[in-house]
Image (spheres, helix red, strand yellow):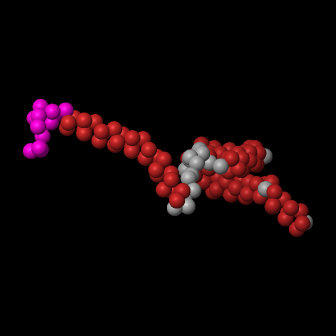
């Protein structure tokens, strides 16, 4: 400071330093994602894709189709109980009241529906269908 010849130039000099620091910070901020990626690569970490893997999506879609088909194959009374209780998540008492049946009857229908669904989905899965045929 004491070596500065022109005190009026101090202000311009300081402003130039401020601009350079701001520019460097801005540049560093823009490069930050790239630096983070390179650090992850160096550590051997894999970068996770925000979307689920394609095979996972296909498996989920296939499982959903299997379940929908199995639900559609239930008797109307079992399907109604299953949908209200498991898909619409109504309480057991509410399902029984809505269908005009006793709670015990609702539980019995729900148990049979779940058992049939489990059997049908298991039989439809590739590995389980072969096992079922070999056990017959």
Report if residue 81 lies within the magenta region. Answer: no
Picture quarter with the C terminus:
bottom right
Horizontal and vertical percent for residue 95? 59, 47
Seen in the image, is 74 located left or right of residue 32? right
Taking the image as shown, residue 16 lies to the left or right of residue 75, namely: left
Q: Nearer the viewer, residue 44 or 61?
A: 44
The quarter of the picture where the N terminus appears is top left
Visible in this render: residue 119? no
Which picture quadrant has residue 14? Answer: top left
Q: Residue at x 68, y 47 (%)?
A: 54
Q: Is residue 134 visible?
A: yes
Residue 32, position as x, y percentages in the image: 43, 46
Front residue (pair 128, 44): 44
Q: Nearer the viewer, residue 92 or 62?
A: 62
Q: Which quarter of the figure has residue 12?
A: top left
Instruction: Establish if 100 lies above or below 126.
Output: above
Number of marks drawn:
0
The residue at the far bottom in this view is 135
Query: At which x and y percent is residue 22?
Result: 30, 39
Q: Nearer the viewer, residue 83 or 135?
A: 135
- Identity of the residue drawn at 56% across and 53% down: 47
Residue 105 picture location, percent across and down: 66, 54
Q: Is residue 8 a member of the stretch shown in magenta? A: yes
> Which range of residues does the magenta coloring cover?
1-12
The structure residue drawn at horizontal position 60% and vertical position 45%, both measured from the top left corner, is 51
């Amino acid at each position: 400071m004491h070596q500065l010849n022109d005190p009026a130039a101090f202000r311009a000099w300081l402003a130039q330093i401020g601009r350079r620091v701001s520019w460097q910070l801005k540049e560093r901020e823009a490069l930050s994602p790239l630096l983070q990626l390179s650090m992850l690569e160096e550590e051997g970490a894999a970068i996770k894709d925000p979307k689920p893997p394609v095979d996972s999506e296909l498996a989920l879609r296939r499982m959903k189709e299997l379940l929908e088909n199995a639900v559609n194959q239930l008797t109307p009374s079992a399907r109604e109980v299953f949908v209200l209780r498991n898909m619409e998540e109504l309480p057991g008492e509410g399902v029984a009241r809505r269908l005009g049946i006793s709670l015990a009857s609702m539980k019995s229908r729900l148990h049979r529906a779940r058992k049939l669904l489990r059997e049908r989905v298991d039989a439809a899965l590739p590995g389980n269908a072969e096992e079922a045929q070999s056990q017959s």
